[in-house]
Amino acid sequence: MNKIYFYLFLLLLGSCGVALKFSTSFERMPIGCDEFGYLNLAKSMDAGKTFTNHSPRPYLPKLIDTLRIKGITENEIAWMVGPHAYHLIPNTYQLINQYPPGTSYLLSLLPQPMRQKAFPALIIIALILCILIAIKSCLKKPFNYFDLVFPPIIFLMMVAAPFTTELSRINSLAPTFGLLLAGGMLLRKRPFMATLFIALSINFRIANALMVFPILLFLPWKDATSINGFRANLIILGKYLSLLVAATLPLLLYNYFLTGHPFSTTYSSIDTSMQQSVGVFKNLIYYISMDHWWFRVHVLGLVILILFLLKRQINLPTLLLLFSFMVLNYIFFGFHQVTMDYYPYASSLILFGFALSLMAENQIAAQLQMAAKLFFLLTTFLIVGIGFQRYSNKTHITYETALQQYQVLCEFNVVWADLYSGTSEYVCNNDGFRYGTTTPRARKISMLFLKANNIKQAILLDDSTVDSAIILKEVKEINLNSHVEENNTVGRILIIE
């Protein structure tokens, strides 16, 4: 049997097994920033409003004008008038989603009730399809050691950190796993195709643009001392740049329609701020730590590559070129003001992809081919078996039941909250405002404006970074009548009458 059929079998059963295993992580409505941000953008795509906020907020320009006339600063407005993942572009009336479009576009391919539960399956399907393309492109040998280790990699992803973290939540890392692994696999023999794969991942995570620069070191440059060599190098560079533009065109268009410039970022100043030089060393210590799983993945990838170096399957210059992916990644995030343990993940997958391509060059002995195929199938059955066991041992709720838990919020036009600001907007199509991201004066002016325009509003007292006593005091100070109701899901609701 052609080994492509084995991979299709792994794609079918593996994606089902992983989806079953993580099912309970996706049965609640989105809460907080990332999950809501990606899911709500997918919802906006459904409505043909990719480049505007899904909730129209027809009163927003007048509210913003009122705030600005009264001397409220742009920073006081930017994160108040929208839920998590949204912010107002300074000096405009445009409330935008900060995230790139890749993950949301992938989610939008499915009906809304299926999107969360199907996310892990989509990740595995995308991963295996990328690997299949890489195999067909340059790894055409019969069953080899890559084929032997790939199903266990899927298994490890469903049971071991850091992969379990990303498979249990809607995010932008997991959709790039296949693109980055395949890019690393193709780097040596098909560098232009590797460029395409790695550049496609930028549509999901903008910081992955860093990873296209070290690819230049693997391009088939000619001797530039001759005219023909110089011309050939110009063609190589042109091909490389054309692939970058073609791969990132969705993101460039998205940026252009939202910000007016293809190379402007949709992220706010909070997420794009760079660290002062005094803090760079502190950031590097934070990232280069065995306490962080993605650093461990980097170390493991380097150890495997060093073993291939000792085996003389690669040379030291090649290893150093590969190391440049990791060095560039960690240096950049050392200067980045916001620190998150998963930020430097991309280079680890490229390193592993390269290592996998080296494994593919070692063919399994003919007498062991049947055993290798049997191992492939058994690992596939193990993945689906573990997924089914986990699913059957958990209590599940339907999408409709999860929606019903937040129906109380649908009575209001504006819900002031923190984590539930997005949940309310996603479930009810109303408007989530964030109470704690601004100043008392901005909140008071806004609440009075909303009241004067007959916009029904509520404040979730137990979901705010501002103490509930202060909230009650502020509402009282502007003479708004209100009362408190209790709800089992969201806690105390301060309803402005």
Image (spheres, helix red, strand yellow):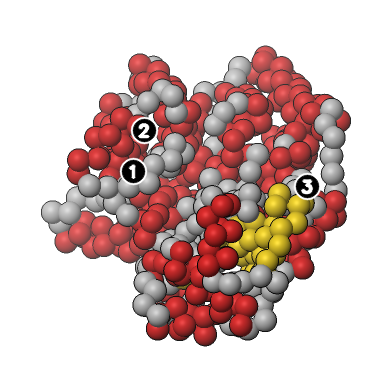
Picture coordinates of residue 265, whole percent (x, y) = 40, 64
Is residue 264 shown above or below 402?
Answer: below
Q: Residue at x 79, y 28 (%)?
A: 390
Hey, which quadrant is residue 77 in on the image?
bottom left
Residue 202 lies left or right of residue 4; in this view the side is left
Q: How many marks?
A: 3
Say what secondary structure mark 1 lies in. Answer: helix
Work out whether mark 2 precedes mark 3 in sequence or the reverse, and give the earlier one. Answer: 2
Q: Residue at x 47, y 53 (%)?
A: 205
Say what secondary structure mark 2 lies in. Answer: helix
> Disc 1 designates what residue?
333
Label 2 Cα crowd, 10 Å radius (few <14 / some 14-19 / many 20+)? many
Q: Which image quadrant: the C terminus?
A: bottom right
Label 1 Cα crowd, 10 Å radius (few <14 / some 14-19 / many 20+)? many
Is residue 350 shown above or below 222?
Answer: above
Check contact, mark 2 vs mark 1: CB within 8 A.
yes
Q: Amino acid at mark 2?
A: Tyr
Give the foreground label among 3 and 1.
Answer: 3
> Disc 2 designates what residue?
287
Cα separation between marks 2 and 3: 40 Å
Q: Amino acid at mark 1?
A: Phe
Q: Residue at x 44, y 36 (%)?
A: 341
Cα separation between marks 2 and 1: 8 Å
Picture coordinates of residue 270, whole percent (x, y) = 38, 56
Work out whether mark 3 precedes mark 1 in sequence or the reverse, and give the earlier one. Answer: 1
> Disc 3 designates what residue?
488
Work out whether mark 2 precedes mark 1 in sequence or the reverse, and give the earlier one. Answer: 2
Hey, which quadrant is residue 9 in on the image?
top right
Q: Which image quadrant: the N terminus?
A: top right
Residue 2 lies left or right of residue 54; in this view the side is right
Hey, which quadrant is residue 431 in on the image?
bottom right
